[in-house]
Image (spheres, grey):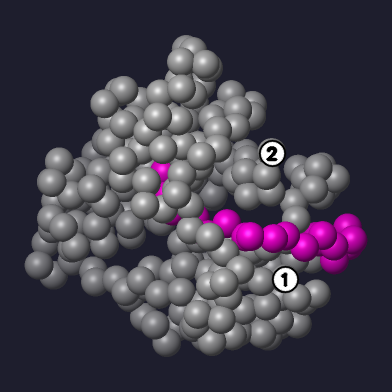
Amino acid sequence: MSGHNKWSTIKRKKGAADAKRSKIFSKVIKEITVAVKEGGPDPEGNPRLRVAVANAKGANMPKDTLSRAINKASEKDGANFTETTYEGYAPNGIAIYIECTTDNLQRTVSNVRSIFNKYGGNLSTNGSLNFMFDRKGIFSIPKGELDDEEFEMELIDAGAEDIVLEEGIFTVTTEMEDFGAMMKKLEEMKIEPENAELQRIPKETMKLEMGSAKKIMRIIELFEEEDDVQNVFHNLEITDELIAELE
């Protein structure tokens, strides 16, 4: 299983905690808000909102919470968020790519820079790490009663370039351009993904000795704990040994 899939598995396990779930809800609500402002409150005519609603359901967000989020985002005086990204290097040359949704850019960049500086990293200029990552569609789908072979054949026909089954969860990877088509295929099959999003997948990963790797993972967690941060991507190699230390 590739490194980004392993880290997704770790985060899914950690996400069971109430504090983590609250953070997940906050991220989903921000995504819903941006989606509604961008394309309206009707999921049928707003593909981005459809994905956000699917992710809300995958995170077990209560229906009334989901409805309130959509209604609130529809209000004229609702919160306005800006999407932005930050790129930088942690110690040992590990590349970190951070996606944020914020209502205060000054606060966000200050907090991101502070973590880089405190832990021996540095914030780089936007665009400096683009060449190190590919944007891919990543879908997490519970296996349930699905027939492995039939399911995989259907998704390969729809553009899946990689399908991995681990601990009862299919992780399906597509090219960025095939993300919408895969979402539509799953809807036709009446399959709701636990999570669906565009991720930045490193073209190459760097392996560090255990002590250094654990420090990097701690820095990544600090970024993820920031309220304005939606996603953090990196090129650290996630080994089985590292997972064992983190669990």
Instruction: Report the magenta residues as a range.
Output: 196-214
- Give neighbour class at mark 2: few <14, some 14-19, many 20+ (Cα, 10 Å): few
Q: State whether residue 190 is above or below residue 171.
A: above
Residue 71 lies, in percent from the top left, at: 15, 51
Q: Quadrant of residue 205?
A: bottom right
Find residue 85 and report its horizontal and vertical position in percent: 46, 74
Residue at mark 1? 94
Amino acid type of the residue that numbered disc 2 sits on in the rendered structure: Met
Q: Can residue 10 be seen?
A: no
| Residue 105 visible, this angle | yes
Q: Residue at x 47, y 67 (%)?
A: 99
Q: Are marks 2 and 1 in contact (CB under 8 Å)?
A: no
Q: Secondary structure at mark 1?
A: strand
Image position of 235 (left or right of 139): right
Q: Amino acid at mark 1?
A: Ile
**Quadrant of the rendering where the N terminus is positioned:** top right
Please provide percent x and percent y for residue 126: 49, 82
Q: Quadrant of the C terminus?
A: top right
Q: Residue at x 63, y 60 (%)?
A: 203
The residue sitting at 69% across, 60% down in the picture is 204
Q: Assign a secondary structure to mark 2.
A: loop
Q: Residue furthest left?
A: 76
Q: Nearer the viewer, residue 225 or 237?
A: 237
Q: Earlier in the sequence, mark 2 or mark 1?
A: 2
Q: Where does label 2 land, which residue?
A: 1
